[in-house]
Amino acid sequence: MSNMEKLMAAGEKCGIAIDEKQSRLMILYMEKLLVMNEKINVTRITDVDEFIEKHLIDSLTCLKFIHKDVKSILDVGTGGGFPGVPLAVMLPEAEITMMDATGKKLKVIEDICREIGIKNVEFLHGRAEDLGKDPAYREGYDCIVSRAVANLCLLSELCLPLAKKGGQFIALKGKNYLEEMDEGEKAIKVLGGKITGIESCLLLQSDLVHVIILVDKVKKTPEKFPRSFGKIKKEPFP
Ligand code: SAM
């Protein structure tokens, strides 16, 4: 079976319909990223089957929860482009902004996207807590997605200020999410969010359970958030 076929078959098992064109683009992205990864470390996953499951399919498990009319999606701490790049391939009508604090990773994914013709993407270099204070970005996106960046409490402070009122915040978490829920839930409420669902997804070959936390932005985030990185690190969520 080719890698393209493997990706389409894995998608089908998870209820995600991936057509040939979409599969070709995602596999091309994977191949180019793995070549670049030898020079600049963007991912520790270098086995193709594992990459398909843990990067491509895992990124797409949140697809069905994204509002249908979404126009702008921001991927906070995108790293090697996950979940942002697979979402950009599957949602060509939406504009996906990949944001990261590390400029050189962002440059790698930008170069690859330009080269293979993924056009509905933007790249934003900076820290979420700074951009969340900047009027050019604050409450500027329909949907914020983020995977493997921080615990739910901290992640909510980074992400919710960037979501429009009426928009969404979707956190892709590991199986230990329960330990983060108490503090996370309190922070989400203060930051203007409301948890609307917790969905678990079992990954295919491995027995990894990943969880998707769905949050609606129901109120504007109070002005004092996000706090500076120093304060977030030193002081507990107020
Ligand atoms: N989301 C990707 C994934 O799931 O494969 C990358 C995860 S990687 C473990 C975490 C990424 O978040 C890193 O690339 C790091 O530079 C970025 N990051 C961490 N804190 C950040 C912040 N405050 N603002 C923006 N990016 C941040």
Image: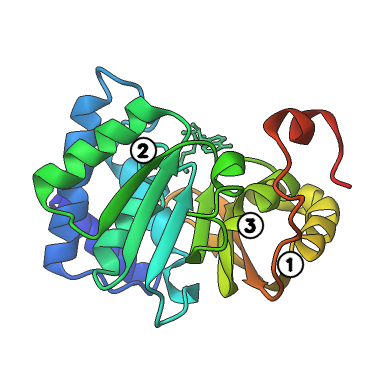
In whole angstroms, how far apart are the C-alphas of marks 1 and 2? 29 Å
Q: Which colour assignment does the render follow?
A: rainbow
Please report contact status of discs 1 and 3: CB closer than 8 Å, yes or no: no
Identify which residue, 70 or 66, lies in the foreground: 70
Q: Give the percent coordinates (x, y) of residue 33.
A: 24, 35
Q: Nearer the viewer, mark 2 or mark 3?
A: 3
Q: Residue at x 71, y 62 (%)?
A: 221
In whole angstroms, how far apart are the C-alphas of marks 1 and 3? 8 Å
Is residue 87 visible to us here? no
Residue 3 falls left or right of residue 136: left
Please report contact status of discs 2 and 3: CB closer than 8 Å, yes or no: no
Q: Residue at x 30, y 51 (%)?
A: 122
On screen, residue 183 above or below 229:
below
Residue 147 falls left or right of residue 63: right
Q: Earlier in the sequence, mark 1 or mark 3?
A: 3
Which label is found at residue 80? 2
Q: Give the percent coordinates (x, y) of residue 68.
A: 41, 82
Residue receiving disc 3: 161
Q: Callout 1: 10 Å neighbours few (<14), some, many (20+)?
A: many
- For badge 1, the amino acid type reads Gly
Q: Give the percent coordinates (x, y) of residue 31.
A: 18, 38
Residue receiving disc 1: 192
On screen, residue 173 above or below 201:
above
Q: Callout 2: 10 Å neighbours few (<14), some, many (20+)?
A: many
Q: Give the percent coordinates (x, y) of residue 54.
A: 41, 47
Q: Residue at x 13, y 51 (%)?
A: 2
- For badge 2, the amino acid type reads Gly
